[in-house]
Image (cartoon, rainbow, N blue to C red):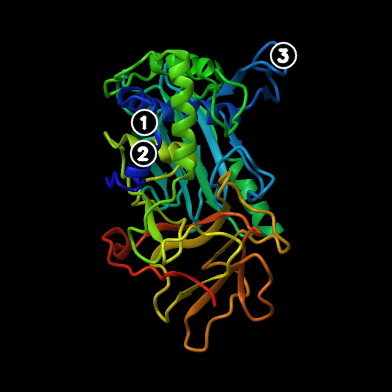
């Protein structure tokens, strides 16, 4: 892993008041807290038949071991997930495997891109089912925890989890048309979670926290949530300063959370671009990258499934802002090389969310309707706050505010995986 994705000199200069041990402890435990936030935001309080998981609509209790679905592409009004994609619908499930294995029924998906990514409580993306790995036919997945022993039923794909807490984050490619949305909704409705004997898998859990939020947590809440998460998901690495005193912990949280979002990444790939995440199955001891991913891009997959190439600065190293205009030009024959699809999405720098704009466009990619190619066959994208006028491919930016770009590459080709692809520079327009 490249542990220099974040400018550590800047971070260290800004964190002299926080000891190395306390800082390291926050970096290690931060993904656990963010996963608890995400679980609270993406599990249901109420079941259609069983009612509320707790004793009131405001309880922290939620239903686990069932799928929940997004039914439309995410937009600026969606604030529970940071750096969301604008290409797929999501089909999610949070699993508790402590009572035994579960079976996931997947309908026939045909040639449509789909993936179920399996993440542990530390955000490691350790397994997949999908078009790349298991194909598009109807299938059954047998998911079990580390303590389970037995024989996997014939005809099922085994998914062996490293812990009992698992996030299944599913993505299904969709076109933003009523017809295609209806088709994907029908597919989503056919995903099912069952016990191996065919009985419903539904169970309750205290999610420890009420909502997703995105701000700096309070020290007492952070310690309570992390303690509970550690009890079920022990750290593979020593925690040098846990538990931390409330005042020290609050200072460390404020500094680490702010800096992981605010410090612009160096242009490691040239032209303003950097590899946001290069994990395959496990972040290992790259605590800094794992914390930054949990803070800003939680739910990312390994690079064989998806690559996330980010630009927070232009080719000159200046932070991207809607106060300027930019051009991104792919030369003829040099579009991103993928086996599924690619897209470039714009996010506000301050909150990592999609930005409202006059034309409702948040991304441009190989499936965008009406793209105009240059006379020589290249593709130019204008990234700016004001409308460049007819004949331009416009990706709107927020006026006078900072933003960043994420180039998503689903099932990227070897040129991206091996680092030989030349990314076009993010160039300030004259």
Query: Which percent across, then down, holds residue 339?
Result: 40, 63
Mark 1 near mark 3, Cβ–Cβ under 8 Å?
no
Which sits earlier in the primary sequence, circle 1 or circle 3? 1
Quarter assignment of residue 103: top left
Which sits earlier in the primary sequence, circle 2 or circle 3? 2
At mark 1, the secondary structure is loop
> Residue at horizontal 27%, vertical 20%?
238
Query: Label 3, on which residue?
Result: 56
Mark 2 near mark 1, Cβ–Cβ under 8 Å?
yes
Q: Is residue 255 above or below residue 97?
A: below
Query: Gap between marks 2 and 1, in whole Å?
Result: 6 Å
At mark 3, the secondary structure is loop
Query: Label 1, on which residue?
Result: 16
Name the outermost residue toward the top: 55
Which disc number belongs to residue 421? none
Query: Which percent across, then down, holds residue 13?
Result: 36, 38
Residue count near mark 3 (Cα–Cα under 10 Å), binned few <14, some 14–19, many ≥20: few
> Residue at horizontal 42%, vertical 79%?
331
Residue count near mark 2 (Cα–Cα under 10 Å), binned few <14, some 14–19, many ≥20: few
């Amino acid at each position: 892993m490249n542990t220099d994705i974040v400018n550590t000199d800047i971070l260290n200069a800004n964190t002299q008041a926080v000891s190395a041990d306390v800082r390291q402890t926050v970096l290690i435990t931060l993904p656990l807290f963010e996963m608890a936030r995400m679980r609270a935001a993406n599990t249901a309080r109420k079941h259609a038949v069983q009612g509320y998981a707790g004793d009131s609509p405001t309880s922290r209790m939620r239903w686990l071991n069932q799928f929940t679905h997004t039914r439309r592409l995410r937009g600026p009004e969606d604030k529970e997930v940071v750096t969301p994609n604008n290409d797929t619908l999501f089909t999610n499930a949070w699993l508790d495997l402590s009572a035994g294995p579960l079976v996931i029924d997947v309908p026939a998906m045909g040639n449509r891109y789909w993936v179920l990514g399996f993440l542990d409580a530390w955000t490691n993306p350790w397994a997949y089912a999908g078009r790349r790995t298991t194909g598009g036919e109807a299938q059954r997945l047998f998911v079990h925890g580390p303590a389970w022993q037995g024989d996997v039923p014939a005809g099922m794909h085994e998914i062996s989890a490293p812990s009992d807490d698992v996030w299944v984050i599913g993505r299904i490619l969709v076109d933003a048309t009523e017809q295609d949305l209806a088709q994907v909704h029908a597919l989503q409705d056919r995903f099912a979670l069952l016990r191996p004997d065919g009985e419903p898998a539904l169970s309750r859990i205290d999610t420890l926290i009420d909502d997703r939020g995105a701000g700096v947590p309070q020290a007492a809440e952070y310690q309570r949530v992390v303690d509970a998460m550690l009890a079920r998901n022990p750290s593979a690495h020593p925690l040098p300063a846990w538990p931390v005193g409330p005042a020290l912990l609050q200072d460390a949280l404020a500094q680490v959370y702010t800096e992981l979002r605010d410090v612009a990444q160096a242009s490691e790939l040239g032209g303003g671009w950097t590899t946001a995440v290069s994990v395959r199955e496990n972040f290992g001891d790259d605590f800094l990258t794992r914390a930054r991913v949990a803070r800003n891009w939680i739910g990312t997959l390994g690079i064989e499934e998806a690559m996330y190439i980010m630009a927070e600065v232009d080719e000159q190293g200046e932070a991207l802002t809607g106060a300027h205009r930019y051009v991104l030009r792919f030369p003829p024959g040099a579009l991103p090389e993928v086996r599924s699809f690619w897209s470039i999405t714009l996010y506000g720098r301050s909150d990592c969310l999609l930005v409202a704009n006059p034309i409702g466009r948040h991304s441009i990619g190989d499936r965008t309707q009406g793209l105009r190619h240059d006379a020589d066959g290249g593709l130019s994208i204008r990234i700016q706050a004001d409308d460049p006028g007819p004949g331009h491919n416009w990706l709107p930016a927020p006026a006078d505010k900072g933003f960043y770009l994420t180039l998503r590459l689903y099932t990227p080709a070897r040129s991206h995986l091996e680092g030989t692809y030349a990314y076009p520079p993010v160039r300030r327009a004259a």
